[in-house]
Image (spheres, rainbow, N blue to C red):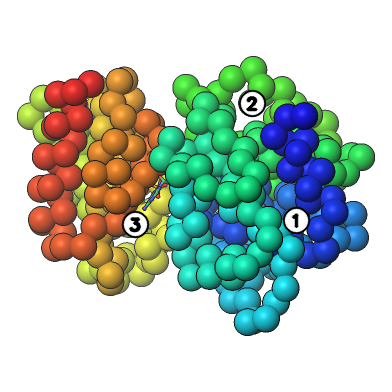
Amino acid sequence: MTPAERIADALRERRHVLLLNHVSPDGDCLGSTLALARALWTRGQQATVGSTDGVPGTYRFLPGSDRIVSEIADGAAFDAVVFMECSTPERAGALAARAAGVPLWVNIDHHVSNAGFGDLILYEGTAAAVGELVYPIVRGLVPSVDAGTATCLMTALLTDTGSFHYANVTPRTLTIAAELVAAGASPAEVYVQVYENQPVAALRLLGMALSRLSVSDDGRVAWTAVTQGMLREAGAAMDDSEGIVGALRAMGGVEVAIVFKEEPDGVRVSLRGRGGIRTHVIAEAFGGGGHAAAAGFTAHGTLDEVVRQTLEAVRREMGAA
Ligand code: AMP
Ligand code: MN
């Protein structure tokens, strides 16, 4: 039996499954937890999708996302919990506490930094999206994938592959995408919902961030910051800054792109890399994680300090690469 079959088998017998997203959830994580929940709902089973940080506005189009909760009453009884893309249980935020005492822990991930916890583990570091790993579980639970579930999984694949143009795309990614389109998902519609539905404030913020762009003397590192002052000036929220780090990659010769996001409780750092750079190694040095091409962490310190320390760590990794 494959790990996906073992997980489908185990979930089939459960009365109430808790599915947990990581904090600051993205399209892959939300699409994957929802797809799995929808399969369980179709079967008449109970499933609760928890997201400590709720659902960002961008992803409220996902069918079923209105049922995602950010709080769960004490005493709710679950007989399985699925951690989606959580390198450690703590990555699920405050809702991780709801997993205590649950008899079956399932860990599904494609991040290199996964700690390998749980009773059933489905881990593939080379999967382009965790949605790729969830798809066979869904197929094992329901006879056919409905259009809503296909849309959730398409969102997972499309957002974690840069709309199918990153180096992580494999024949499997495109085969699953083709099956999802046949099942009723529209990549065009998902793209518009995720990337072409931004408030004007997000574009103003992008403009501000790009006008403050710094580039290292050798052109290999590009970075910028989003401060609380910039959010106020643009009338934007921090969620509106998601696309900025991707925009920095457009510059020829850049190997590491970094966005420093000044949050009330610290500085959230988004890293993107290409070539031989392993951005997760940089992030792990600060207690974060991710993939070679995309990683992140939160640091406690002033913006200037975090920028300096991060650039030093980037140089160390560039020396090692
Ligand atoms: P982001 O820049 O927030 O889009 O994150 C890029 C990648 O790094 C995603 O795969 C995240 O799941 C991962 N990541 C970001 N922050 C952390 C963290 N604090 N711990 C572990 N992984 C992280
Ligand atoms: Mn992912």
Residue 64 percent location from the top left of the image? 74, 61
Residue 205 percent location from the top left of the image? 32, 57
Going by the picture, which residue comes out furthest to the left? Answer: 217
Q: Nearer the viewer, mark 3 or mark 2?
A: 2
Give the amino acid at mark 3. Arg
Q: CA distance from mark 2 to mark 1?
A: 21 Å
Residue 35, can we see it? Answer: yes
Mark 2 in CB contact with mark 1 (< 8 angstroms): no
Residue 9 percent location from the top left of the image? 81, 43
Q: Which mark is residue 204?
A: 3
Q: Which mark is residue 173?
A: 2
**Residue 271 relative to residue 71: left or right:** left
Give the amino acid at mark 1. Ala
- Compared to 166, does 58 lie above or below? below
Residue drawn at x 13%, y 32% as measured from the top left = 315
Q: Nearer the viewer, mark 1 or mark 3?
A: 1
**On the rendered image, what quadrant is the C terminus found in?**
top left
Q: Which residue is mark 1?
A: 37
Label 2 sits on a secondary structure element that is helix
Q: State the image quarter where residue 250 is shown.
A: top left
Residue drawn at x 73%, y 49% as measured from the top left = 35
Residue drawn at x 28%, y 26% as measured from the top left = 277
Q: State the image quarter where residue 317 is shown.
A: top left
Front residue of 190/101: it is 101
Front residue of 131/121: it is 121
Front residue of 288/226: it is 288
Report the number of discs: 3
